[in-house]
Amino acid sequence: MKPTKKLPLFCITGASCAGKTTVCNELFKNETDYIVLESDITWNDVYNTPEDDYRTYRRMWTRLCANISQIGLPCVVCGACTPKQFESLPERELFSDLHYLAIVCDDETMMHRMTVGRRVTDENWIASSMQFNKWLKENHDKTQPNIDLLDTSNLTPEQAAEYVDKWIKSKLITK
């Protein structure tokens, strides 16, 4: 069955420890105009296919979000991603628009969150997260469509969630 309502899809991306999960947890508390979904809950190594930009995983999430949005509320999916991973999928046609927001922070804040807050010791994980955070900051305006940025370095989780909520609602109003 093909969904009949085409609503926007909101993708909240960011590196590990930039703050995306924290922001999404705050959004869960008050969501009424959209449905927030944390993509990590379905992750399995079978989806670990960077060579094809995690195509099967992205297709599963777009189909899931398109079906959930049939209740009349758009989905906000939280998880590390880039626009090119979604925009070329056949399921892209199931949405009116896709909007991307990257949660980023400065290097010092990220390192502190990773090593002190989350106690990450895996050097590869740290390096990969730092690199993706940097890539988002340097390339957000070079992607198609562009990725909006929110720097959470000096924001409380509540302030960051308030910004994201307003960002989502501003995109809904323009429709």
Image (cartoon, rainbow, N blue to C red):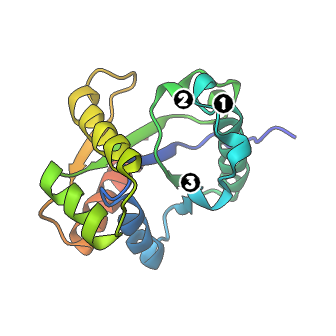
**Residue at mark 2 to residue at mark 1: CA–CA distance:** 7 Å
Which is in the foreground here, disc 1 or disc 3?
A: 1
Q: Tell me if residue 174 can be seen.
A: no
Which is in the foreground here, disc 3 or disc 2?
A: 2
Work out which residue is located at the far bottom of the displayed protein and give it: 29
Quarter of the figure with the C terminus: top left
**Residue at mark 1 to residue at mark 3: CA–CA distance:** 19 Å
Which mark sits nearer the N-terminus, 2 or 1?
1
Q: Position of residue 15 (x, y in %)?
A: 36, 48
Which mark sits nearer the N-terminus, 3 or 2?
3
Q: Answer with left or right where residue 109 lies relative to residue 169.
A: left
Question: Which residue carries the number 1 mark?
Answer: 55
Judge whether 27 appears above or below 63 on screen.
below
Q: Amino acid at mark 2?
A: Gln
Q: Residue at x 73, y 50 (%)?
A: 67
Mark 3 Cα-neighbour bin, 10 Å: few <14, some 14–19, many ≥20: many
Mark 3–mark 2 CB contact (< 8 Å): no
Question: Which residue carries the number 3 mark?
Answer: 75
Q: Nearer the viewer, residue 67 or 51?
A: 51
Q: Residue at x 35, y 69 (%)?
A: 118
Q: Position of residue 146 (x, y in %)?
A: 33, 28
Question: Which residue carries the number 2 mark?
Answer: 85
Quarter of the figure with the N terminus: top right
Q: Secondary structure at mark 2?
A: helix
**Residue at mark 3 to residue at mark 2: CA–CA distance:** 17 Å
Q: Secondary structure at mark 1?
A: helix
Which mark sits nearer the N-terminus, 1 or 3?
1
